[in-house]
Image (cartoon, helix red, strand yellow):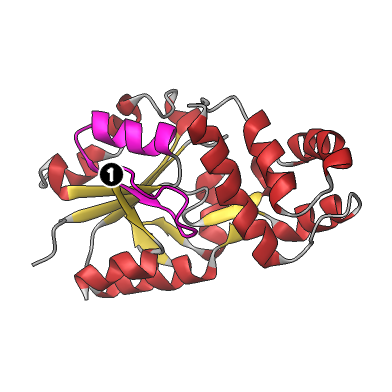
Amino acid sequence: MPRFDAVLFDAGGVLVLPDPSVLGPLLAYYGGDASIAAHRRAHYAGMKAKSDIDAGESSWDAYDDAYVAAVGVPATDRAEAAEVLGRTRYHATWRWLIPESRAALDRFADAGVPMGVVSNASGQIEAMLARHTCQVGPGDHVEMRVIVDSLLVGVAKPDPAIFDHALPAFAEFDRERIAYVGDSVTMDIGAASAAGLHPILLDPFDDHVGADFERIASLDEFADEFA
């Protein structure tokens, strides 16, 4: 039997990433690797850097510094490159769909797993996901029971109260049997734990070895539980 009755997902870092087709050329100017693979790696390096200093949602300097270093910007140009990245990487660029995550959502849906999204966002997340990933209720993509955008509900992770806007859609389940998958120790693991959910960190590059919370390398790995 699966351990969980339902699954909630963060959006950034779990379903989508900052668009490498935008950030690749931006940082190539400074000598950075423009490949999608390099920029995928850079995102999780940035999230690890934020976690290491327990940076909140509004603090992205550590992320930007780690990101430009991860794509290979030389040390002499990193400060400028990080500043430019910080000015360019805004909410509208969080739109690049992680292909294996999209495929995994189909597997969850095929297994009949109730799902939802809870994201720190800027009012755009539901419309963006509806283009290629998921929507509330039946539609062209994977069905979600709820999609919560922090700007629209007025509360953001790590405040666990953000989940109060999602959990009524899963009222038939005990909280401890609802998993929440995110990519931030501070924002996601902390908030989900405080809300009584089961937190899982998406950690595809094994950046958090020895952590005292559950980690997975991909959503596809997690979907195996429900097959």
Quick check: 138 above or below 145?
below
Secondary structure under the numbered disc 1 in the rendered image: loop
In front here: 153 or 55?
A: 55
In front here: 146 or 155?
A: 155
In front here: 97 or 182?
A: 182
Q: Residue 214's x, y, as percent?
A: 28, 50
Question: Looking at the figure, which quarter contains the N terminus?
Answer: bottom left
Residue 72 part of the magenta-drawn span: no
Quick check: 198 above or below 23?
above
- Which residue is the site of mark 1? 213
Would you say 184 lies left or right of 163 here?
right
Would you say 128 lies left or right of 81 here?
left
Q: Would residue 145 be visible to someone looking at this image?
A: no
Question: Looking at the figure, which quarter contains the C terminus?
Answer: bottom left
**Amino acid found under the numbered disc labelled 1:** Phe
Name the residue at 30% across, 65% down: 222
Name the residue at 39% across, 27% down: 158
Q: Residue 100's x, y, as percent?
A: 48, 71
Quick check: 172 above or below 41?
above
Name the residue at 86% across, 35% down: 80
Count of all numbered marks drawn on residues in the image: 1
- 10 Å crowding of disc 1: few (<14), some (14-19), many (20+): few
Identify the image quadrant of residue 62.
Answer: top right
Would you say 89 lies left or right of 185 here?
right
Residue 192 part of the magenta-drawn span: yes
In front here: 134 or 108?
A: 108
Identify the image quadrant of residue 131.
Answer: bottom right
Q: Residue 202's x, y, as percent?
A: 41, 53
Q: Would residue 152 be visible to someone looking at this image?
A: yes
Name the residue at 31% across, 27% down: 160
Magenta part of the protein: which range? 185-213
Q: Residue 182's x, y, as percent?
A: 40, 46
